[in-house]
Image: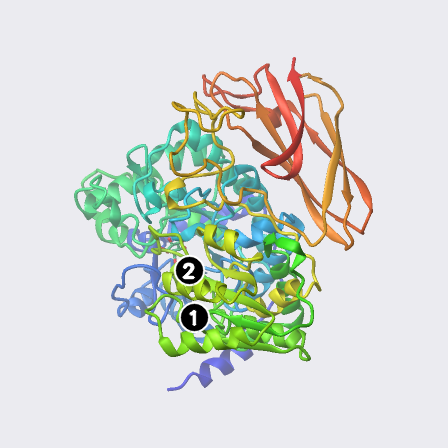
Amino acid sequence: MGKQHLIDEMNKNIKRNPIPKRSEQEIKDLAKKMLEQMTLEEKLGQLYETSYDGADVTGPEFDSSNVVNLVRSGRVGSILGMNDNVDMYMLQKACVEESRLGIPMFFANDIIHGCRTGYPINLALAGTFDMELVEEAYKNIAFESSHSGVNLTFAPMLDLVRDPRWGRVMESYGEDPYLGVRIAEASVRGFQQDDLTSYDSVPACAKHFVAYGAAEAGRDYNTVDISERMLRQYYLPQFKKAIDCGVTSVMTAFNIYDGVPATQNKFLLRDILREEFGFDGFVISDYTASDETMCHKTSRNKRQVAKNCIKAGLDHEMISTTYIDEIPSLIEDGEVDTKLVDEAVLRILEFKYKIGLFDNPYKNMYANADEYQLLPEMLEHSRDVARKSIVLLKNENNILPLTKQKISVIGPIGHLNQVVGPWGGRVRFEDCIPFIDGLRNSRPDYDITFAQGCKTYQDADENLFNQAVETAKDSDIIVLAMGEHQWMSGESRSRTDITVPKVQMDLARELKKLGKKMVLVLFTGRPLDLTWFEENVDAIVNGWYLGNETGNALADVLFGDYNPSAKLTMSFPMNVGQIPVYYNHFNTGRPIPADNPHSDYVSRYLDCRNEPLYPFGYGLSYTNFEISDLAVSTTKLKENEQLTVTCKVKNTGGVAGEEVVQLYIEALCFSVTRPMNELKGFQKISLEPKEEKQVTFTLTTEDLAYYNIDMEFTAEKAEYAIRVGNASNNLIEKVIETV
Ligand code: GLC
């Protein structure tokens, strides 16, 4: 039987009745009442997330043939990765109408940087340094998600990252914890909108708890070994902020912390999340991460997996079935207390009551979901965000913006519509605007030719190569459309080589011989080694992966209809040998003396400088800005007194533009070593040509605090440099002291 009868039923039966806003206590009472009616088997069903045929399985395949029977017997708490709302309705109907208690399931999905309208990858979006824009983007993403069956999104990804070999840096916001805290706030507020009963918001899940981005050698799923001070100073604050903003769930990371897998780590899941952070939502594992504790060799078998994880505080197993398979006998043998199961079940039931699933099990399901996707205002907004995510890295002799001339676009990504990046949600490539199309849409009267030149990474093709050289010869300026294919980054996409693929480099070198002006438009999910391009092309535009409106947004910037304003939130190394290289590094005991950079017996390489090619906070504009007149309200800051920091910013160029004024500090001495720079604020301001504005920041001793030698978070009495500028390596400073 086709799906039409289900579609008719959905259209007739699914109502959008307002969902009552209940108090915390009302929700707890309702969940407790439901719990008292449940059998152990039904309870364990609530702790299980499965997937379904045709769903986006994001890990090892598994057999989902028995899902409908499990659903009918009330043994499934949630389903991962489904996209078809009619199939979701069919399964929810089976669950609600046929299982004994009719407890609705929730449907979870990885809506990371776009549902059907793809926004820029997070590493690009963060570079806007515009938190209102970021919040608006996630609010729009929530609208499309909540109108296509999503009851929980597995976002925001809050992993701090310092290693571009790791494929998932594209999904993160970069190398700074302060920016991470701001992103956590903007994303949770954007997704949830402080109203989980709304039909326009979507509950969020902060992941991956914790320190997944610190995987050794940038190899996905690899060992993590960091100190507790590093954990607290760099990896936890983002999650604390997400929890303070009401995030409904937290996902455990694949990795270990202090030798114990996060998924069975009591210190993380109970001591920190529950006791310290006061988190009252639910904890879900990552995909089969509970089973994987056997590979970590901290669980000998599935029975031990279930025991370790439930005791550590894991509430919901994704794909693994150790709870439903092993906990009954563990309880029978007195090895697991039913109370542990009940506390996990209550958290799942409370979530379902909180978001209104008991009031409307079909909340967010639409037979006509497509009508709510790709709305013109959404696409326009995503285009605006995309152009504000583009980073201008080089512009020698102001070769950009492009003027009317014979333009040849050469490179294997110039025509691709696969430009949304990994974790592209439900974006369809046919809805994405390729680079060359964007250019031609924007300037139909311009002479713009295109040649692919090669494939993204496969062996050279002589015909393509020769066509490209011929096309380029017959032009005034060559625009290279090169970089990584979008599948070269993302989960399980670690690379030991962070250069643009060789076949593309060979083409670029050949075109260089023509002696023409050259611009690189880069497509990438990670920082790459761009040293050859820095030395050999006139301009470099980092286009990341920008989503549906990629071509149009890049055209807006290249033709100067928008003056680029984004900054890097992750350092671009000179080469892979420098990794990890990041702005908030320590000084070491043997820094390179400024007056003698070639000293021996100091911390440096024989064959490369220490600084990255492009640092955190760096990004150019078509105009120039001057930051001056730094002033502080006092040079002796008392406990909890406010320090006011002001500076002047002037647009000294000929076009309007936006600048990201950044505020950093450096503790000049502390009971533990501290970074050379720590971001503590930023403001993005717009200035007309020759216009000048004053920018004001405020700091308290709380902002200067750090985990000291006794692991107390405090601002010890010390001297602190206060710095402002437009990149982490371009700052002016004043020194104050705390008294
Ligand atoms: C994946 C990812 C995680 C994602 C989950 C569900 O393996 O690690 O980020 O949310 O599985 O798709």
Question: Disc 2 on helix, strand or loop?
Answer: loop
Residue at left offset 80%, top offset 51%: 689
The answer to whether residue 639 of the structure is visible from this angle is no
Quadrant in which the N terminus is drawn: bottom left
Quadrant of the displayed image that contains ligand 1 = bottom left
> In the figure, is residue 268 to the left or right of 533?
left
Q: Which mark is residue 61?
A: none
User: Where is residue 514 shown, x and y percent of the image?
Assistant: 51, 67
- Viewer-nearest residue: 449 or 346: 449
Q: Residue furthest right?
A: 691
Label 2 crowd (10 A; few <14 / some 14-19 / many >=20): many
The residue shown at (64%, 76%) is 441
Q: Look at mark 2 in the image and give the residue it sits on.
A: 103
Q: Residue at x 33, y 46 (%)?
A: 254
Q: Confirm or deny contact between disc 2 and disc 1 (CB under 8 A).
A: no
Q: Is residue 376 left or right of residue 4?
A: right
Residue 88 circle label: 1
